[in-house]
Image (spheres, rainbow, N blue to C red):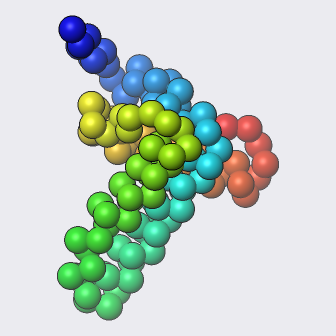
Amino acid sequence: MATEPKQYQSFKEFYPFYLSQHKNRTCRKLHVAGSALVLFTLAYALLTSQYKLLWLLPVIGYGFAWVGHFFFEKNRPATFTYPLYSLMGDWVMFYQEIKYYLTGRSR
């Protein structure tokens, strides 16, 4: 019998679990690459009025992340169980990883 997923009461409570699912460096790098491409694609689509490109945003974002999970992390993406908190976690981790790359300071 499958167990019920933990019900987190807040994002603050969820985020340590989220990070535990992203221990593999390549997985995190793929998340960062996908998130950066999402931002660039969004900016390009809006600045050039090519709104048809907006459908690519979830494909790019989730595509890179899921490759990281299935091939490197070897786990099930948290998106399937915690979609909103997972999306929030993606952007918090993106910020923390970019900050780390630029400053060298620990996460």
Horizontally, residue 106 falls left or right of residue 31, namely right
Image location of residue 106, percent across then percent down: 74, 38
Q: Residue at x 22, y 82 (%)?
A: 51
Q: In which quarter of the image is residue 54?
A: bottom left
Q: In which quarter of the image is the C terminus?
A: top right
**Above or below — where is 20 with respect to 84?**
above
Image location of residue 25, percent across then percent down: 65, 44
Q: Residue at x 45, y 58 (%)?
A: 64
Q: Residue at x 66, y 51 (%)?
A: 99
As drawn, which residue projects farthest toward the bottom? 48
As drawn, which residue projects farthest toward the right? 104
Residue 97 shows in this picture? no
**Above or below — where is 20 with respect to 77?**
above
Residue 68 shows in this picture? yes
**Above or below — where is 55 with respect to 51?**
above
- Tag count in the figure? 0
Q: Which residue is drawn at 76% across and 43% down?
A: 105
Q: Which of 41 and 22 is in front in this view?
A: 22
Image location of residue 44, percent across then percent down: 38, 83
Horizontally, residue 24 falls left or right of residue 87, namely right
**Above or below — where is 75 with respect to 102?**
above
Q: Quadrant of the N terminus?
A: top left
